[in-house]
Amino acid sequence: MISMPGGSEWILIILVVLLLFGGRKIPELMRGLGRGIREFNDAKNNVKQEIEEGMKEKDKAPSQQ
């Protein structure tokens, strides 16, 4: 079973990130991560909206049987 890291594990992770990237690169890294998440959510919402619009168009179209 994989579980969420506890308090001491988070401290270790933060220290490793600080050592790898340095204090000046962290804000830049977080901005990039935020942009990536925002773009992903925008794309997800666009796909969802297109699917919903397609379903509405299908319901409006007269059925030919």
Image: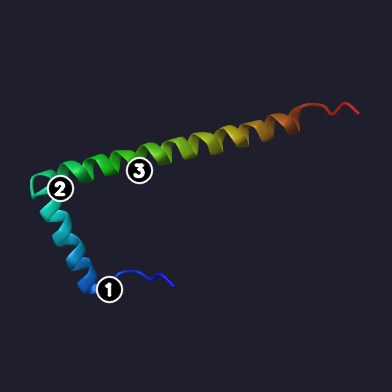
**How far apart are labels 2 and 3 at the CA level?**
16 Å
Label number found at residue 26: 2
Residue 61 rendering spot, x and y as whole percentages: 77, 27
In the depicted structure, whether residue 1 falls above or below residue 13: below
Q: Mark 2 touching mark 3, by CB under 8 A?
A: no
Q: Is residue 33 left or right of residue 16?
A: right
Mark 2: secondary structure: helix
In this view, the residue in front, 46 or 11, is: 11
In this view, the residue in front, 42 or 13, is: 13
Instruction: Please report whichever mark, 1 or 2, sits nearer to the chain's N-terminal start.
Output: 1
Q: Is residue 14 left or right of residue 64?
A: left
Amino acid at the residue labelled 1: Gly
Query: Looking at the image, which residue is at 14% across and 61% down?
Result: 15
Mark 1: secondary structure: loop
Q: Is residue 63 left or right of residue 2?
A: right
Q: Which residue is mark 3?
A: 37
Residue 56 rendering spot, x and y as whole percentages: 68, 33
Q: Give neighbour class at mark 3: few <14, some 14-19, many 20+ (Cα, 10 Å).
A: few
Residue 26 rendering spot, x and y as whole percentages: 15, 47
Instruction: Please report whichever mark, 1 or 3, sits nearer to the chain's N-terminal start.
Output: 1
Q: Give neighbour class at mark 2: few <14, some 14-19, many 20+ (Cα, 10 Å).
A: some
Camera-near label (1 vs 3) is 1
Mark 3: secondary structure: helix
Camera-near label (2 vs 3) is 2
Amino acid at the residue labelled 3: Ile
Query: Looking at the image, which residue is at 42% across and 37% down?
Result: 42
Q: Which residue is mark 1?
A: 6
**How far apart are labels 1 and 2 at the CA level?**
22 Å
Q: Is residue 3 left or right of residue 15?
A: right
